[in-house]
Image: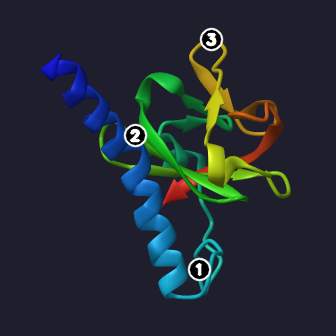
Amino acid sequence: MKSWKRWIIFWVVLTVVPQQLVADESHRHDSPEIRQHSEPEMITEADLALWGIVDGCLNSKLVHYFYVLNSHAAVIELVGGKKVLMRFHGDCQGVEQYGFVHTAQNNKFCAGSHSIRVLQTGDRCKVKSLEPYP
């Protein structure tokens, strides 16, 4: 019984607390938008490969966990600690409130061809891009 309670607490800490911290940080700066670089940077295929992104696809075995930034993007933390920004096409309604699930095909999750499914509503949001996140 005690291990069950620990598991629930562990799950809540991993899923709810990071989202709340991100939400608090966004509200503190009154900017729910994703950070923009002042100068456009050219990201090469070699740079993307360091984050596990090859041909626009992420190896799903590298995913440790993910959290929602806002209705336009989520962050995927990889096993080695690196982070990948996953942008959605347009506004993904309900993703901030309910979270999402994704399905990888052949251990790959690809921008442009894959989508996420919002929990509770079942709405789908297409993944626009996967890119390194500082």
Estimate the spatial distance between the alpha carbons at disc 2 and disc 1, rounded to whole Å: 22 Å
Q: Residue at x 81, y 31 (%)?
A: 113
Vertical side of 43 occupied by 62: above or below: above
Task: Please give the residue where the numbered disc 3 appears in the rendered image.
Answer: 106
Q: Position of residue 54 (x, y in %)?
A: 59, 34
Q: Residue at x 52, y 26 (%)?
A: 59
Q: Quadrant of residue 7?
A: top left
Estimate the spatial distance between the alpha carbons at disc 3 and disc 2, rounded to whole Å: 18 Å
Task: Please give the residue where the numbered disc 2 appears in the rendered image.
Answer: 78
Q: In front of the other: label 2 or label 1?
A: 2
Q: Earlier in the sequence, mark 3 or mark 2?
A: 2
Q: Position of residue 62 (x, y in %)?
A: 42, 29
Q: Position of residue 81 (x, y in %)?
A: 31, 47
Say which mark, if any, is on residue 37: 1
Q: Is residue 83 left or right of residue 91?
A: left
Instruction: Point out the image quarter for the N terminus.
Output: top left
Q: Quadrant of residue 13?
A: top left
Q: Is label 1 in a helix, a strand or a loop?
A: loop
